Amino acid sequence: MTAERPAGADVVVIGAGIVGAACAYHAARAGLSVCVLDRGPLAGGTTGAGEGNLLVSDKPPGPELQLALLSNRLWRELGAEQWRSGTVADRIELDVKGGLVVAESEAGLVGVRQFADRQRAAGVAAADVTSADLPDYEPKIAAGLAGAVHYPQDMQVQPMLATAVLLRLARDAGATVLPDMEVTGLLRDGARVTGVRTAGRTVIAEAVVNAAGTWAGEIAALADVSVPVAPRRGFVLVTEPLPQLVRHKVYLTDYVADVASDSSALQSSPVVEGTPSGTVLVGATRERVGFDRTPSPDAVRALATSAVRLFPFLAQVSALRVYRGFRPYCPDHLPVIGPDPRAPGLWHAAGHEGAGIGLAPATGHLIAQALRGVVTDLPLAPFRPERFMAVP
Amino acid sequence: MNTAPTFDISFDGRSVPCQDGWTIGAALTAAGVRSWRTTRIAGRPRGLFCGIGVCFDCLVTVNGQPSVRACLAPARQGDDVRTQLGTGT
C-alpha cells in the first residue's frame, strides 16, 4: 500500500463555460487526463448569458475569422456525432440556419458588399441578395431595405446544452468535472505553475488552462502575470414563443461596426433570430460599465426599437424577459490562446468577447494540439497571452 | 357581502360568471377550469402558474387575439375566450 498522493492530471481546466468545456473535450479525446474545475455551476458565467451565435459573417479577414472558419467545421463534426438515439446537433439545438446581413441604405449596401468580397477571398461563403429577393429569405422583414448578403455558414446553438454535452463527452473520454470548486491558488515551482489549490484539495498538473472567461485576469494574477480581459455588458431580449417567423440570424450592418468599436457608450444594433422553443431573441447591446448588473431600460428600449425596424410584426409581440452577460474582451478584440511564457505550465483560453460560443471548438482543438506538442492547425502567434506587455 | 356587479364571459362557447375587477384567469379558475392552453410541441395542458404575468404559461385566445395572459387580462362582459392550441395562429 502506498501513501495517499495528491490528485493529479495532465491538464487542469479552470472554468466550465463553453471554452473550458471545449478544451476538456478536445484534450480528453486526444488521450490526456483532464480535470475541469469551476467555482460555480456549468455555464454559470458568460456562456449561460449568451445568444449562441456561431458567426463567420461579422468577422473581417484575419486571425479571428480563421478561428471562426475552423470552429464552423468543428461544430458540424460535433453535431454529426451520435447522441443517444439521435445526433449531438439535435441535442444542442445546432441549427445551420444561415445569416442575413441587411443594409438600410444604398451606401450601407455598398459597404456590406465590399466587406463580403473581402470575406469571400478568405474562404467565407456569401451571396448577394437584392432588395426584391429579400422576402424570399425573410417573408416578414420590413419593406424598403436596400439589400443584404446571405451567409449560409452562420449557425446557432443553445450554449448551455452545448457546454453540458461537451463536458459529458469529455467525461466519457475519462475527464473529471468538478463544479462548485473554486481555485484559490496555483501551485508554483519558481515561475512555473504545477497545479491548482482549492479550499479542500490540490491537483497537480502538467498544464493549467485558464478558461475563466471574463474573470481570466484574476486567475492570471494568481500566477503574477497580467491578462487584460475586461467585461463588456450585453443585453438580450426574449419574446413570447411564436411560430417560426424569423428564419435566419438577421442583423443590420451596424452590428459589425459595433463589434469592432472601441467606444464605451451604449451601442445597439439588432441581431434577430428565432429559436427551436419558439421565442425570438434580440441581441445585442454593448456597453463598458464594469460588472454592473442593473437592468437598463435604455438598453432594452434600444434593442426593441431596432428590432421592430427590421421586423415590424415584433411591435405586436410581448417580451418575456431580458438577460445580460459580461463578454470578456481584450484591448485588441482578439482572445488569448496558448501557453504563457511568463509562467510556464499556465495556458490561457479566454477573452473571446461576444464570440466565445462560436470560437470555442477551435480554441479547444488548438489548445489540445499545442498541449500534445503537435503543430497547430492555425498559428497561435496572434493570440499570444503576453502580447499586451509594455515595450520597455 | 360582495355586491360587485356580475356578468358573463364565454369560454369555448359556454357561459362563465364573472364579477367586476376579476381577470379572465380568476373567472376561469372560479368556474373550475384549470387549463385553457396546450403546449406547442407536446400538446400538454396549461393554465395559471405564476399568476402575476411573468411566466406566460396561462396564455389564452380572447376575442380572436392569441397569447393573452389570462392572469392579467381584465374580464369584460361578453368576452369570447377560447382554448389556445399551440401558438394559437
Image (tube, rainbow, N blue to C red):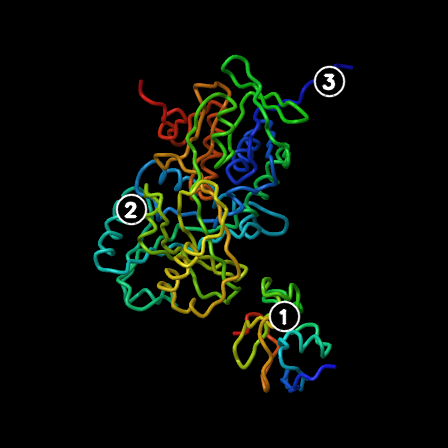
Dot 3: what SS? Answer: loop
Between A296 and A329, which is closer to the camera in this rendering? A296
Residue found at the far right of this picture: A1
Q: Which mark is residue A4?
A: 3
Residue B9, numbered circle:
none
Q: Are marks 1 and 2 on the same chain?
A: no
Tag 2 residue: A120
Image coordinates for residue A219, horizontal then vertical, percent: 51, 28
Q: Distance between the residues labelled 3 and 2?
A: 58 Å
Quarter of the image for the N terminus of chain B: give it. Answer: bottom right
Quadrant housing residue A225: top left
> In terms of image quadrants, where is residue B70?
bottom right
- Residues flagged by tags 3 and 2 on a common chain: yes
Q: In this view, does A359 lie above or below A377?
A: below
Chain of the residue under the numbered disc 3 shown in the image: A
Nearer the N terminus, badge 3 or badge 2? 3
Residue drawn where x is 64% and y is 77% of the image: B22
- Identify the chain of the residue marked 2, using the numbered disc in the image: A
Q: Nearer the viewer, mark 1 or mark 2?
A: 1
User: Which amino acid type is marked by label 2?
Assistant: Arg
The residue closer to the viewer here, A33 or A191, is A191
Relative to residue A236, is residue B62 depicted above or below?
below
Separation (CA) of disc 1 from disc 2: 46 Å
* Residue for badge 1: B38
Q: Which amino acid does label 1 sit on?
A: Thr
Q: Is residue A270 above or below residue A223?
A: below
- Closer to the camera in the image, A81 or B24: B24
Establish if A238 lies above or below A47. Answer: below
Residue B89, how many percent across, how many down?
A: 52, 74
Q: Residues within 10 Å of mark 3 (few under 14, many from 20)?
A: few
